Amino acid sequence: MRWSNCYIPTLKEAPADAEVVSHKLLTRAGMVRKLTSGIYIYLPLGLKAIEKTAAIVREEMNRAGALELSMPMVQPADLWQESGRWEFYGKELLRFQDRNGRDYCLGPTHEEVITDLVRGEVRSYRQLPINLYQIQTKFRDEIRPRFGLMRGREFIMKDAYSFDRDEAGADKSYWAMYEAYQNVFKRLGLRFRAVEADSGSIGGSFSHEFMVLADTGEDTIAACTGCEYAANVERAEVAPPAVPATLPAVGAIEEVPTPGKHTVEEVCAFLGVPQSALVKTLILVADGKPVAALVRGDRELNDVKLKNLLKCDELELAAPELVQKVTGAPVGFAGPVGLNVERVFADHELLASDGWITGANKGDTHLRNVSLPRDAKIERYADLRVITPVDACPRCGQPIELTRGIEVGHVFKLGTKYSEPLKCTFLDEDGKEKVMVMGCYGIGVSRVVASCIEQNHDADGIVFPPPIAPFEAVLCCLDPKNGETLGKAEEFYAELKAQGVDVILDDRDERPGVKFKDADLVGMPLQLVVGGKGLARGIVEAKDRRTGEKTELPVEGFAEAFRTWRAAVRAGWGL
Amino acid sequence: MRWSNCYIPTLKEAPADAEVVSHKLLTRAGMVRKLTSGIYIYLPLGLKAIEKTAAIVREEMNRAGALELSMPMVQPADLWQESGRWEFYGKELLRFQDRNGRDYCLGPTHEEVITDLVRGEVRSYRQLPINLYQIQTKFRDEIRPRFGLMRGREFIMKDAYSFDRDEAGADKSYWAMYEAYQNVFKRLGLRFRAVEADSGSIGGSFSHEFMVLADTGEDTIAACTGCEYAANVERAEVAPPAVPATLPAVGAIEEVPTPGKHTVEEVCAFLGVPQSALVKTLILVADGKPVAALVRGDRELNDVKLKNLLKCDELELAAPELVQKVTGAPVGFAGPVGLNVERVFADHELLASDGWITGANKGDTHLRNVSLPRDAKIERYADLRVITPVDACPRCGQPIELTRGIEVGHVFKLGTKYSEPLKCTFLDEDGKEKVMVMGCYGIGVSRVVASCIEQNHDADGIVFPPPIAPFEAVLCCLDPKNGETLGKAEEFYAELKAQGVDVILDDRDERPGVKFKDADLVGMPLQLVVGGKGLARGIVEAKDRRTGEKTELPVEGFAEAFRTWRAAVRAGWGL
């Protein structure tokens, strides 16, 4: 492709509403334009990056034996009513009626449609397992679409669905997808980590998120520095504490006045004790009923863990009125002693010590010398808190490191969550009708491109890994009006194409500075400059966009020199 | 690909609601499944056929210098309000509100979005011309979705939009697309014809439809047997008649009673005259005002021609009440003499004779000896009727042939229909702000696959042209349990792949009859049988799906023999 024939509308300024770097750079590099809130046009270069990503995803899915199909974006309501999600999905599911008044939605995901297809097609165990996928446009009516392609309303996703005879088969399908995802993200040249993720009420450990590591990520990952363990902090386990054989004897409870001290910080500073000496009592509402959760004063409750423990659908902090009702005190003075809440749960760390400071369920008052076993009614001690950097790996005990990441993929063992209500059954070898065991596997294709930029950029623009770059190489002809220079550039251009490099020839009649700036902004990994003094000296200047390192490639023997240099740049990307 | 790893759910029976052969065969061949009215799932084989079609379209668009981008399916109402189409588009435009109550639609086409993009990007004549295209899913809420992929609600389309400085540039862009379309349909192996189409109120001859020829087509094409002229009958011109220097003298008008004779057939039979002796008077309503149109009794009014002549938006037959009002008689007795309609138009054929029978504007009565020049007030004589097989070519006078076709592509010079209201302007070389001149160019990609089947099928199933076939070749291994036979089949399989043939190896443990039936149903153009007596004799049996012709390819020298045979089969398709 020649730059003069392409459409790459680079901009000096980022749009005013762009909050994150990927949104700014995708716009400035002429790759996307916003049509309306959360909805983007992919310009030629943006589409190329997406297509290159999609092609690698497709290859790895095919290699793993998944079969590509394509399902509609418009889905009938009846299937969603059958699965029960029509009621539960909330406003992200964009609903509408057609001209005949029938209910439809824009597909945010395709479990219902694929399960409906498979139940109509598969009759016998001989037709299983099957794994079907598509790369398709989805729509989720996000309440606050933002961050450009990171959280748009209309986006491109690869979604795969596996159907198996039994749990063992489903596990095999799951791990095959896990491997395929590892291959995809390795091949894309991204620094990523597969982390254990919360699988919600379905249970089991069969959910992994694939996170592109980036400081700007919305998710936090707890990764062990010693072993392979990594998990979303939402889920990261905290090892049970070392509980001493005997705990120190605890004296009688005494009330202490803490006038106007509502927060842990205020109370501890006032009493002159460390925050770890206090027990925080949180009042929550689980599916409409009040519950209490206790964690050490310097810890944070992990509500996903509590939700899973309670197996509830909704969990939220209680309103001040309810706190007043069950504690008899304003917010800030709740405690486990004499609390009017039936179900009280405590983080297992609280087993490791005794004699706590807690709220007194009385305004402006706390208690000292509270012994939980003695003074409170705890239903269960369990892992309830958010992991911290001082915690040890729950697997090997080595230190944990917290890093930030962007979720770009998710593999999930669904079990029979959809096949059961939709009656997706088959006749097994033993002649019995059984429900299929499903898995679902998503990659946010447009999101991969955005998160790749969040991970790889500098002050000059995007630093694309070669597999995602719209063009792997740019060949900048310094003086295209000079026939000899242009002729030489065309020669190199032909050579690069012969080597299978997707290259763009910058043949524009622009100043070199403009061309260099554009090349850096768009982020082509391999940058070659043809013309000027270099060409006079018999060399082509080559720049590795990632490192900025410059190399001189001889005009004589260019093909071989380029091949070697390209391999070195790719190796720098771990490719 | 191996058949055993693929998902090709062939069926013996077509679905009950399938009316046309492409719908029946696409379903039976396991290529599509209906999700809901007018909305289909593309199964792996259906998707392959679509992707192969799309790839050829993409190549030819790129070769013609068009640039691929991708626009959203969800479009904001405000752009449609700006173009004026929000009001006029009708119910095919599926409208809905998002969670914030803002109006959107599902894109049935993208003129508004692309014009909005270009007006925001292009400032100078130096950035023109530009031609942008996408291959994308569209939605039209058809009142009666039917015929499977032929007229679905959700479908895949390639749509391109060109922007030029002036008319001359727009014409050049138009003809470049015309050429690209010729190349696309030639390369797809389809029998097609580019025909002049009606371009509605925009005028000019700059609209062509690309028709796949098929007896089941909904459109009728008038094509000259002598020259290149071809046009949709909607538009096909009828040459002016040879008008004699003097017409026979016409006697005085006389009333004849025609009791209860309403139709042309009834009146002419009753009076014992040919239908060509009568003038039919049609009362219509054009944008709310009554008009009359006269054509010979044996002709049909072409309302598209009348509409273009009147430059009106709406044209429909008058209701009986209005007919009664302007003629003073019930329907069936209208005539030009004394008609209470201001604007009366006559087909120019009526200039070639005189002394007509017409309605008398009086119940149960007709007139004889009507001379239009003498007795009626005709605003204009013009080409107003539908062409017939007895008409001559309007260009060369040779005979016309009427054939049926399916519209799969449309190129259209839009002019400033969208750029004007949307203020899509640029600064020209002379420093003046000018409105861009646009063209739009569509190919119904999913429709191409369906119409290809309408054109190419037989009692056994689909007869795919090699470029569209999901697999160009099937290699049927007769006895896959026999290691030696399977080994040989695998060898040929590898050889075909090495020759760049997209081949499927039928390695299923099924009876040969089942395999042959499936191969014919799915319509693979090249069918090879490995095993049995043939293999014992040192040959592979090869069948051309189109002709049914069988050839024996020797095992020794298979590669070369196959290469030759493949070329011959392709040549039979005109490839």
Image (cartoon, coloured by chain):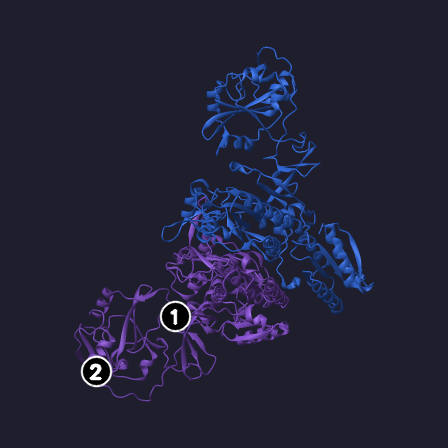
Chain colours: A purple, B blue
Place of residue B165 in the rendered image (x, y in percent of width and height, measured from the top left): 51, 47
Q: Which residue is mark 1?
A: A308
At 56% across and 32% down in the image, what residue appears?
A: B305
Amino acid type, label 1: Asn
For residue A472, side relative to residue A271 (left or right): right
Residue A127, compared with residue A214, is above or below; it is above
Amino acid type, label 2: Gly
For residue B14, side relative to residue A543 (left or right): right
Comparing A534 with A79, the one in front is: A534
Place of residue B452 in the rendered image (x, y in percent of width and height, measured from the top left): 64, 48
Place of residue B33 in the rendered image (x, y in percent of width and height, measured from the top left): 57, 53
Q: Residues within 10 Å of mark 2 (few under 14, many from 20)?
A: few
Occupied quadrant, residue B278: top right
State whether residue B279 appears in this view.
Answer: yes
Q: Quadrant of the N terminus of chain B?
A: bottom right
Q: Earlier in the sequence, mark 1 or mark 2?
A: 2
State whether residue A176 appears in this view.
Answer: no
Residue B76, compared with residue A22, is above or below; it is above
Residue A398, compared with residue B339, is above or below; it is below
Residue B286 marker: none
- Secondary structure under tag 1 reads helix
Alpha-carbon span between mark 1 and mark 2: 36 Å
For residue A77, side relative to residue A63 (left or right): left
- Secondary structure under tag 2 reads loop
Q: Which residue is mark 2?
A: A272
* Label 2 chain ID: A
Comparing A30 with B17, the one in front is: A30
* Label 1 chain ID: A
